[in-house]
Image: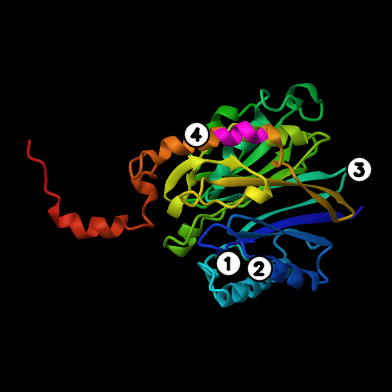
Amino acid sequence: MSRITLSVIKADVGGWVGHTSVHPQLISKAEQVLSESSLLKDFHVAYVGDDVNLIMTHELGVDSTEIHQLAWDTFLACTEVAKELKLYGAGQDLLSDAFSGNVKGMGPGVAEMEFEERKAEPVIVFMADKTEPGAWNLPLYKMFADPFNTIGLVIDPKMHRGFVMEVHDLIEHKSVKFSLPEELYDLLVFIGAPGRYAVKAVYSKTTGDIAAACSTQRLNLMAGRYVGKDDPVCIVRCQSGLPAVGEAVEPFANPHLVAGWMRGSHVGPLMPVSVEDSHPTRFDGPPRVIALGFQIANGKLIGPRDLFADVSYDRARQKALEIADYLRRLGPFEPHRLPLEDMEYTTMPEVMERLKERFKPIED
């Protein structure tokens, strides 16, 4: 059987209204452009908050110039629609006017993986809004390294050897791999700092196959200014030596704190929601995550199933709202507002420069 590539490429090309949602005409335009391409085996256009997410299957491998060009052209076409509708921030994630062979470093977020289809190939595409790539660190740790979450690590012979987790240093642009479980404590030293270190991929030690892939693009670092949060995507393959679907979604039953929310400058709970509820409004939030499940059959996307449209996540949502209430009362004070080192793309440098002469040495 030929190998298949699953590519998820996302961008914010215009919000409706403000940063809350995607206008239906943008979805229709994206579907039109992708349907006219002969490159794809299948596709699905999704959205979460104000982000358009292109979920595509093909046989061209990861980092394919043709696929990335197709995604870029799709986002450009959507941007034109956004400008006509005067949507907010039209084209804000497209940091260049010209495609250079790969959308990485140009604004859009990218998660891709190539694999040979198994007898049954369930995958989950997680998509988040109002947060950053490190938001996946804790859920992926629990999925692939925590037996209290994933019992398969204990009782499934295909999982018992563990996994290899690839981590990216988003500041130094370096990569490191950790073998789990034996290097678990070393791993946690780094991924516990999600603003700098983000999980990029996970691999099975039993088969060597890729099990998960994430986007790790940092918009502010690429643009050198505040242009919105990164709103990352993550692909997780499930079952048959990998976490069961239920094990992959279980980490989101306890909403953890992530950076992002209003103006990308606040900490908030990552709330698991259905697609229908993926319109962050309160203080442009709280941060949201959706989970679309597919069975891949000969490259076709059978689905999606809206996995968080489930009453068993009602308590998680309620807890997230309670956390949001508490944090909002803190206003501009940390830990609701991000620490100073994460505020360099806001007005903070301007204020510091303006007031620097007023800071005097303290005399003992």
Q: Considering the numbered disc 1 on the image, is that residue within a helix, a strand or a loop? A: loop
Q: Considering the numbered disc 2 on the image, is that residue within a helix, a strand or a loop? A: helix
Q: Which residue is mark 4?
A: 322
Q: Position of residue 69 (x, y in %)?
A: 69, 71
Prevalent SS, magenta region: helix
**What segment carries the magenta color?**
313-318
Report the residue at 64% width, 67% height from top. 102
Which picture quadrant has residue 156? top right
Q: Is residue 261 left or right of residue 10?
A: left
Q: Amino acid at mark 1?
A: Val
Q: Mark 2 vs mark 1: which is more N-terminal?
A: 1
The label nearer to you, 3 versus 2, is: 2
Q: Mark 2 vs mark 4: which is more N-terminal?
A: 2
Q: Which mark is residue 26?
A: 2
Report the residue at 39% width, 57% height from top. 345
Q: Position of residue 72 (x, y in %)?
A: 65, 70
The label nearer to you, 2 versus 4, is: 4
Q: Is residue 243 visible?
A: no
The label nearer to you, 1 versus 4, is: 4
Q: Position of residue 245 (x, y in %)?
A: 76, 36
Q: Considering the numbered disc 4 on the image, is that residue within a helix, a strand or a loop? A: helix
Q: Which residue is mark 1?
A: 13
